[in-house]
Image (cartoon, rainbow, N blue to C red):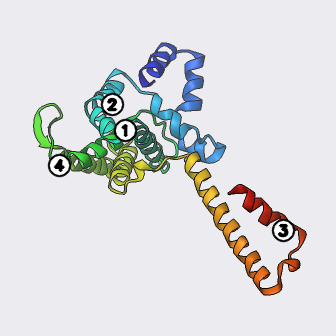
């Protein structure tokens, strides 16, 4: 999807449509906060500034994402990826007038997950320096922290930090296992709560029968007992 969106925006970058896509879908914190364009917290991840930008992100995603996906499962991987990207966007909200794009925050969430799952795996940092993944993550975090404080470069350092923190927490806390929209789980909890309430009402009615006799029951209580008996 990232590659498809990049190809489309690259072809349309000089056109009116390209400007329209920029306005609507790049992350612009001031528009999110004042005009309610909250979808930009998701859509900005699919846009990239150039071949180097998307190439580096997709290379990291390919290199580390494969093992993370195999380890966690496809659904958990996507949950981790998109939540990391969205939180990365939220970390960028102080940059009110910035125009932010790219999957770097989401990809760094995957990198943090990879480092948590395989901390002692040796990689070639920046293609030349052998380094354990856990040390590489700290190095990337330190570079982004310095960049955020110093305001260096045309890079969304706060987004990178947000993605790293989110990926780390989701793995360490096990949050990647929890579906965002757990419809089946919600239905199961509702059913259990309903069964508990029904059981409590049955007990209350039976207590009334033992205390006052069957004749003390009103119509709704008799119908409820009959319904519970038929449901078994």
Determine the residue positioned at 25% across, 47% down: 117
- 3D distance between C-alphas at marks 1 and 2: 21 Å
Mark 4 highlights which residue? 135
Q: Position of residue 142 (x, y in %)?
A: 25, 51
**Image quadrant containing the C terminus:** bottom right
Taking depth in this image into account, of 80 and 134 the one nearest to the observer is 80
Asked if marks 1 and 4 touch (Cβ < 8 Å), the reply is no
On screen, residue 96 versus residue 207, left or right, reads left
On screen, residue 124 versus residue 105, left or right, reads left
Lower sequence index among marks 2 and 3: 2
Lower sequence index among marks 1 and 3: 1
Asked if marks 1 and 3 touch (Cβ < 8 Å), the reply is no
- 3D distance between C-alphas at marks 1 and 3: 50 Å
Determine the residue positioned at 10% across, 38% down: 130
Mark 2 highlights which residue? 57
**Image quadrant containing the N terminus:** top left
Asked if marks 4 and 3 touch (Cβ < 8 Å), the reply is no
Lower sequence index among marks 2 and 4: 2
Lower sequence index among marks 4 and 3: 4
Outermost residue, top side: 11
Taking depth in this image into account, of 176 and 129 the one nearest to the observer is 176
Q: Position of residue 47 (x, y in %)?
A: 46, 28
- 3D distance between C-alphas at marks 2 and 3: 66 Å
Mark 1 highlights which residue? 73
């Amino acid at each position: 999807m990232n590659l498809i969106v990049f190809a489309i925006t690259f072809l349309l970058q000089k056109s009116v449509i390209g400007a329209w896509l920029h306005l609507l879908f790049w992350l612009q914190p001031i528009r999110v906060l004042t005009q309610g364009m909250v979808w930009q917290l998701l859509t900005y991840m699919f846009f990239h500034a150039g071949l180097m930008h998307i190439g580096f992100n997709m290379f990291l995603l390919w290199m580390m994402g494969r093992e993370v996906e195999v380890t966690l499962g496809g659904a958990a991987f996507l949950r981790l990826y998109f939540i990391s990207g969205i939180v990365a966007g939220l970390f960028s909200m102080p940059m009110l007038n910035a125009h932010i794009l790219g999957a770097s925050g989401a990809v760094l969430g995957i990198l943090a997950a990879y480092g948590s799952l395989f901390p002692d795996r040796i990689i070639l940092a920046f293609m030349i320096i052998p380094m354990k993944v856990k040390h590489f993550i700290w190095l990337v975090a330190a570079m982004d922290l310095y960049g955020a404080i110093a305001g260096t470069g045309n890079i969304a350092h706060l987004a990178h930090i947000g993605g790293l923190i989110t990926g780390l927490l989701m793995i360490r806390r096990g949050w990647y296992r929890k579906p965002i929209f757990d419809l089946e789980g919600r239905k199961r909890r509702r059913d259990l709560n309903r069964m508990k309430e029904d059981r409590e009402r049955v007990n209350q009615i039976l207590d009334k029968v033992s205390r006052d006799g069957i004749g003390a029951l009103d119509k709704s209580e008799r119908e409820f007992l009959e319904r519970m008996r038929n449901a078994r």
